[in-house]
Image (cartoon, grey):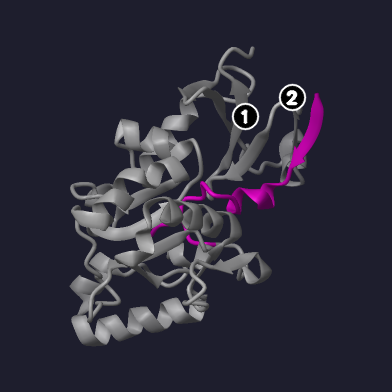
Amino acid sequence: MKKIILQRSRIYSGSLILVNRAYGYKEKDQGASLLPVLEQEPGILMQRRAAVLLFHLMNKIDGWRGIVPVSGWRSGREQEEIWESSLEENGREFTETYVAYPGHSEHQSGLAIDLGQKQEEIDFIRPEFPDTGICGVFRRKAAKYGFIERYPRGREEVTGIGHEPWHFRYVGIPHARIMEQNKLTLEEYIDFLRQFPYGERAYRFSEDGQEFLIFFLKMPDRGNGPEREIEAGRQIEIDESHPYWISGNNVDGFVITQERSRHGR
């Protein structure tokens, strides 16, 4: 067993961080961790893992023949400029429906991508991305590569953002498939995982000969007593004979994912 100390500051990083109006993006700009999503569009960037999976997905479906990347990573300043510009051009109601507050945009994390159907004119704020054709193929394959449609129709009260069929968020494998199968938004998935505390019981997900164990580890609130040591970090033990990865949720803890063979213990 391997001992790991999870620092409180790591809550704010990872592929499962929740970024919305209630929980802003707290990490610094991504810098060297970003990659272009397409060679012909060097200015449209995502976090490295997300960009690589998007590359594989697009290659699989020959996606770039009918899909264009519209917007990826944004700096805090760029998000503020988009917000102010939309307020001026479209008004407050439209802007609050379709544009995230500066500091509260998934685009600042490098985990989100806006995609559009290839056509002569493309709306930067609301690009066309229908359910048909190559766009529909992308949507049906996305979760297999770790992507979800982040703002689905009918879930506006949960996400705080209007329906955006063009906005996809990388959350990783197997989480995208679990969310898709259970029709959960990221907000709902973060809450759902609280039922599976680390060291007690796991959420088990099996697909394509792989089994995944998923746990939630809550970081206790800062206090004045003995648990003040939690501010520095919390130590856990994990079986390193199986691949694992850990993501903060940007709220109050960590999601721990471990891959096992379907017949493993």
Who is closer to the viewer here, 214 or 140? 140
Residue in the image at 73% along x and 40% along y: 230
Residue 169 percent coordinates (x, y): 42, 54
**Type of the residue with mark 1:** Gln
Q: Is residue 15 magenta?
A: yes
Residue 203 percent coordinates (x, y): 50, 23
Residue 97 percent coordinates (x, y): 24, 65
Quarter of the image where one finds residue 187: top left
**Type of the residue with mark 2:** Asp
Query: Is residue 227 found left or right of 110 in the rendered image?
Result: right
Q: Which residue is mark 1?
A: 258
Q: Is residue 201 magenta?
A: no
Whether residue 115 is visible here, answered yes or no, is no
Who is closer to the viewer here, 125 or 134? 134
Q: Which residue is mark 2?
A: 239
Residue 143 percent coordinates (x, y): 39, 42
Magenta-highlighted residues: 1-25
Quarter of the image where one finds residue 58: bottom left
Query: Is residue 153 found left or right of 111 in the rendered image?
Result: left
Q: Secondary structure at mark 1?
A: strand
Query: Which quarter of the image is occupied by the C terminus?
Result: top right
Q: How many marks?
A: 2
Residue in the image at 36% along x and 39% along y: 188
Mark 2 or mark 1: whose residue is earlier in sequence: 2
Whether tag 2 and tag 1 are in contact, CB under 8 A, the answer is: yes
Q: How dense is the environment of label 2, judged by Cα within 10 Å: few (below 14), some, or many (20 and up)? A: few
